[in-house]
Amino acid sequence: MTYAGDVAALARKDLLLELRAKETLPSMLLFVIAALTIFHFALPRGTSHAAALGLLWAALIFTALLGLTRAFVAEREQGMFDALVLAPCDRSAIWLGKALAVLAFLVAAEVVALPAFAAFFSGVDGRTVAAVALADIGIATVGTLFGAMAVAGRARELLLPLLFLPMAIPIVAAGVGGYLWFLAGYDAIFAVLSWAAFEYVVAET
Amino acid sequence: MISARGLAKRYGDRRVFTGVDLDLAAGGFLLVTGPNGSGKTTLLRVLAGLAAPSAGELQLPERHTVGYLGHSPNVYRELSALENLTLFGRLYRLPERAERIGMLLERFGLWEMRRDRVSTFSRGMQQRLGLCRVLLHEPSLLLLDEPYNALDAQGAALLDGVFDEPRTWVVATHEPQRVERRATERLAFA
Amino acid sequence: MRLPALATACTGLVGLALALIFFYAPTDADQGFSQRIFYFHVPIALTSYACFGWGAWKALRYLRTRDERADLESYVAIHQGVIFGALTLVTGSIWAKASWGVWWSWSENELVLFLVLFLFYCAYFMLRFSVDAGPARANMSAVYALFGVVLIPVSFLAIRLSQKFIHPVVFNSHGPQMTNAQFFVFCVSFAAVLTLFATLYQVELAGKRLDAHVRELRELLT
């Protein structure tokens, strides 16, 4: 159970950092509410529920992107990858700890965003909530891996959306339709792949 | 401890160094000197196992016995000194973590401020904490990149004391006077 | 030695395929002359998949062996894949214009998939340009290339699902209803495009290797 212990220690560290810095989550919350407000004015009066729901998914993806861009900032600024990579824990634990923290931020943002959406537009049904929850797992797992890639590059903030958005297209395509089995399959496939690949992204040896 | 033959590192077409031969026995002290940008940091990263050599043979000790302190102190700014060390203590699965951490903080004069965030520390205090972090798991091979950077006279004296410990050392510095006499191996980059 | 033979075979096959497409293939009863673009569009699309698949295979080889050559090969294969992918989008768009009078149709699953793949693999180049050459870049490129081949079926499925959701129409598959003559022309054309890929792949690889060699020599001289 040392693996679980490592993951817990690393995830706890990220939550603690956020608690101190208060940067990521407040930005995500403000962003998603602002986006929903913009959508209200962008959509013509009397738009169908389906159209509004589609925009909710767009808002959630871009909000997640905002959080993912910040995910490895502390590691990058302080050269922490060097220290973490040399530690004897399995490198995938670094990924899992970060992915869990990202997942927590996503869920926290959506706890506000979904009721706000229900109030601003039309109600949210259970299927949508389940789809969003499943989508979060896919976003957090793939996004954390690609976030680690993006911080290694020069373009950084610019690079992550380019890398991540094509991966998010299937999530939105299936999420809008409420295909839960597809989202669960997406999560399983890409979580395993990200878990196995992370070591190559952060370490040369 | 370290054995290298014909070690080379390049990034694409840019050669950083080539043909480095090296034998560092346990307890040895390798002093790496040279001006800025001559490849000292890259060599240290290769010897720490953080970067893969482009060519040559290299034998390194196991990962958990290695400590590496780079240019930046490699600690989280928004965590306290204690939280930083506790995190790494966990990751290294240290027994009697609290005692060891307390001892190191005491030794480097950080005990009083152990609950303060690192972002409130001066650069020299951060470097001291970085030293605590790499010494925490009692590495047998310790690689330090410009360790005297930002340290005041007291901090530098503390670091001199660290070098008395029975470990294998690789130290890169552009002002080698302080550690010259300890060196058993030398590598000068131009 | 290998390259000239490949180039000759490629020229012959492409010539033969063009001749067959324009002079031998029967004119389609429904779509008329413009249906002949099918013999370009589908082989190019399939070749593009082959490129991405080959690139991912080389990426896997790289992660296993850490051989720099595999990294370069993976890069070149994906580069060719993006070129063929862009051609797929262009030919598909022309076909859509000829058949339905529109340049773009979201109901063509394969075309939509190519748009997604095109976006994904363009980002591959952004990744490579933004990271310094070396093992870290090679590792990341390889991981990204592997995600790409997994994304192909996942995206395809997602696009089909969303199709059902957005417009409930049946999919028309135009594979098996080919006549023998049409199938023959298709096969020749596919072989021609695959050989074209193999040739371009070797040419680009040779060029890149030569380039690296020259730079190495220049480095040694200075």
Image (cartoon, coloured by chain):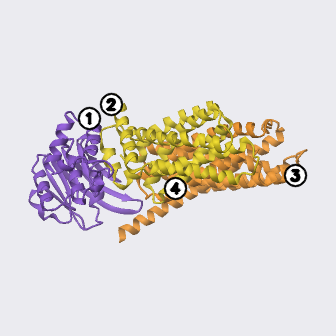
Chain colours: A yellow, B purple, C orange
**Spatial separation of the CA atoms under disc 4 and disc 3:** 44 Å
C32 or A54: which is nearer to us?
A54
Instruction: Same chain for labels 4 and 2? Say yes or no.
Output: yes
Q: Position of residue C73 (x, y in %)?
A: 52, 51
A25 or C115: which is nearer to us?
A25
**Spatial separation of the CA atoms under disc 4 and disc 1:** 36 Å
Q: Which residue is mark 2?
A: A2
**Spatial separation of the CA atoms under disc 2 and disc 3:** 68 Å
Q: Which residue is mark 1?
A: B93
Q: Which residue is mark 4?
A: A159
Chain of the residue on which disc 2 is drawn: A
**Amino acid marked by disc 4:** Leu
Q: Residues within 10 Å of mark 1 (few under 14, many from 20)?
A: some
Is A104 situated above or below A45? above
Residue extending furthest top?
A1
Which image quarter is the C terminus of chain B in?
bottom left
**Spatial separation of the CA atoms under disc 3 and disc 1:** 73 Å
Q: Earlier along the polypeptide chain: callout 4 or callout 2? A: 2
- Residue C69 at least partly seen: no
**Amino acid marked by disc 2:** Thr
Foreground: disc 4 or disc 3:
4
Chain of the residue on which disc 3 is drawn: C
